[in-house]
Amino acid sequence: MKNTKRIVVAGGGIAGTIVTNRIAQKLSEELNRGEAEIEVLTESEDHIYLPGQLLLSFGIEDQSSLVKKEKYLLDSRIKLHTSISGKMKKIDVANHEVITEDGKIHRYDNLIIATGVEYGWDEIKGYKEGSFTPFEMDSAMKLRERLADFSGGTVVINVSKLPHRCPVAPLEVTMLLEDMAKKRGIREKTKIIYTFPVGNPSGRVFGIDTTNKVISKMFEERGIEVISPFNVSSVDPDKKVIESSEGEKINYDLLISVPPNVGSRIIQDSEIGDRRRWVPTDKFTLNMKGHSDVYVIGDATDLPISKAGSTADFESYVIANNVANDIKGNLGRKSFDGSVLCYIATGMDSATYIRFNYNRPPVPPPPSYVHWWGKLMYNKMYWTVTAKAIV
């Protein structure tokens, strides 16, 4: 009788999809012989390429190019559970099982937690009602319509709390907006204010010093006003006023928001996360702390690095290798070095990027069309290369 090893991936999305396909490659022979089995649990049948929503807001991407069916992205040997069969009720790491809403118990030898991020809109009164955000598809589509008709006024880009998914996105929104206004001939009628919750030094726009220095200079050269620290406390959608706990009030015509990020509710319900629902994760092994058979990937971790798709991609190599080693025992163990790569749009046809890890801080190169092309190609190649773990 075969002793089938069971691998459960808790969550689809970018992180769950990439790591699942990479594990399937590492265990291809074992899957074919029935010695290994991989299940993915995710509530939605749709897979959304979240980073593309930013460009969607500015009319550079179409919604149809950002949504695919999850089943078409996964290796055909993977067992995909969606809807009630994929909605998780409890992750029970003590008993090595995940329970779904249909009552089924999914036992595992290895678990990968890829439960991602949820948005805590209710933490700030009036925030959702008074703003647009590229972080949610419906709002990104509405922002696209609003920007298409935009003829000038005061625009506030607000980062509510740290950390948040895709940390360079609000920088991109700000510079895309500034360049858009300039190309339309309405820059003189457009006041752009960027607010950031951390302000040491005062006027900070980004968390990493080397990147902050470069982008801050770009903002200054483009006449973009920066207010930091600015910790949003409330928004009045009717009067169009955003207020901070520091006592600052800003009147706006358009508010673009980065909502508070928290981990998935299943992490809280399973009592395996911290107060913001991030899962305690070893920064090198990517194991959930105290559990050698559980790995954490992407936005679900509490690691002090960017919550970005590229982070999950880099992490997937380590996790796939180590899961396969747990089963086959002949691959050795890899260690994660904190690698991240993020393209940063600096205008409607220019970009830079940051590439860094735990030990090497990023230094963005000068913006260019070449990097803009690289950003667009990275997005286009996601479906055929990255998501399917081709390289």
Image: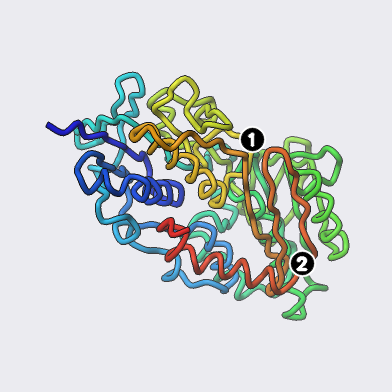
Amino acid type, callout 1: Pro
Residue lying farthest left?
A: 1
Q: Quadrant of residue 229?
A: top right
The residue located at (71%, 71%) in the rendering is 350
- Give how far across and how far down residue 90 sits, in percent: 32, 29
- Residue placed most toward the observer, 219 or 130: 219
- Front residue of 170/237: it is 170
What residue is at 67 percent from the left and 43 percent from the top?
357
The residue carrying mark 2 is 367
Task: Inspect the image, locate mark 2, and give the three-letter code of the amino acid beneath it.
Answer: Pro
Residue for badge 1: 304
Spatial separation of the CA atoms under disc 1 and disc 2: 26 Å
Viewer-proximal residue, 146 or 209?
Answer: 209
Say if mark 1 contacts mark 2, CB within 8 Å: no
Q: Please, is residue 235 above or below residue 58 in the view?
A: above
Q: Determine if residue 180 is in view.
A: no
Give the side of residue 7 with respect to residue 320, left or right. left
Q: Quadrant of the N terminus?
A: top left
Indicate which disc residue 159 carries.
none
Viewed as shown, does residue 24 lie left or right of 34?
right
